[in-house]
Image (cartoon, grey):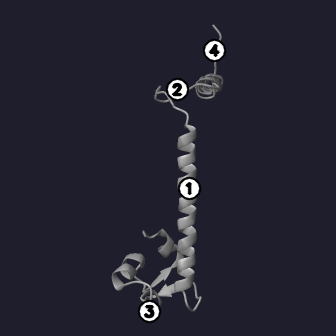
């Protein structure tokens, strides 16, 4: 009987595992998940449209937040301090948006905050 060394056995195991993975996950119209065996449904045109509308709404909100931040940043130094912010909102909102409590709101803090 011919002896196989560890490198050859390892190579064969990896080769077989790759083949199994390829045939189960890249099988064209395969609608089953390779890991769970559950059916994977394709996204309907209505779902695609809803996702596109949601993405467009998110982009619009982002643009509005950038524009509002720019309007509040009167001295155009890239941050909104408390006195600038209070012309547009109140102290409790300032505290919510000033995440690191440094007395100013950066564009990232403003955009990442809620409404």
**Nearest the eye: 65 or 1:** 65
Disc 3 to disc 2, how far (Cα)? 58 Å
Give residue 94's quadrant in the image. Answer: bottom left
Q: Which residue is mark 4?
A: 3
Disc 4 to disc 1, how far (Cα)? 60 Å
**Is residue 99 visible from the viewing direction of this image?**
no
Left or right: residue 45 versus residue 96 is right
First in sequence, mark 4 or 1: give its number: 4
Residue 114, position as x, y percentages in the image: 42, 68
Q: Secondary structure at mark 4?
A: loop
**Is residue 84 visible from the viewing direction of this image?**
yes
Residue 110, position as x, y percentages in the image: 48, 75
Residue 14, position as x, y percentages in the image: 61, 27
First in sequence, mark 1 or 2: give its number: 2
First in sequence, mark 3 or 2: give its number: 2
Q: Mark 3 and 1 residues: CB-CB less than 8 Å, in contact?
A: no
Q: Secondary structure at mark 2?
A: loop
Residue 83: image tag: 3
Q: Mark 1 and 2 residues: CB-CB less than 8 Å, in contact?
A: no
First in sequence, mark 2 or 4: give its number: 4
**Nearest the eye: 33 or 61:** 61
Q: Residues within 10 Å of mark 4 (few under 14, many from 20)?
A: few
Q: Which residue is mark 1?
A: 55
Disc 2 to disc 4, how far (Cα)? 40 Å
**Nearest the eye: 76 or 48:** 48
Disc 4 to disc 3, how far (Cα)? 81 Å
Left or right: residue 19 versus residue 36 is right
Residue at x 57% of width, y 63% of height: 59
């Amino acid at each position: 009987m011919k002896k196989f060394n560890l490198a050859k056995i390892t190579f064969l195991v990896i080769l077989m595992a790759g083949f199994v993975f390829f045939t189960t996950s890249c099988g064209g119209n395969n609608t089953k998940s390779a890991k769970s065996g559950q059916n994977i449904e394709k996204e309907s045109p209505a779902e695609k449209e809803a996702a596109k509308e949601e993405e467009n709404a998110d982009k619009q909100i982002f643009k509005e937040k950038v524009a509002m931040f720019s309007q509040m940043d009167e001295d155009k130094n890239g941050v909104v301090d408390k006195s600038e912010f209070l012309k547009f909102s109140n102290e409790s909102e300032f505290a919510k948006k000033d995440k690191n409590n440094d007395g100013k709101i950066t564009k990232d803090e403003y955009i990442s905050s809620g409404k």
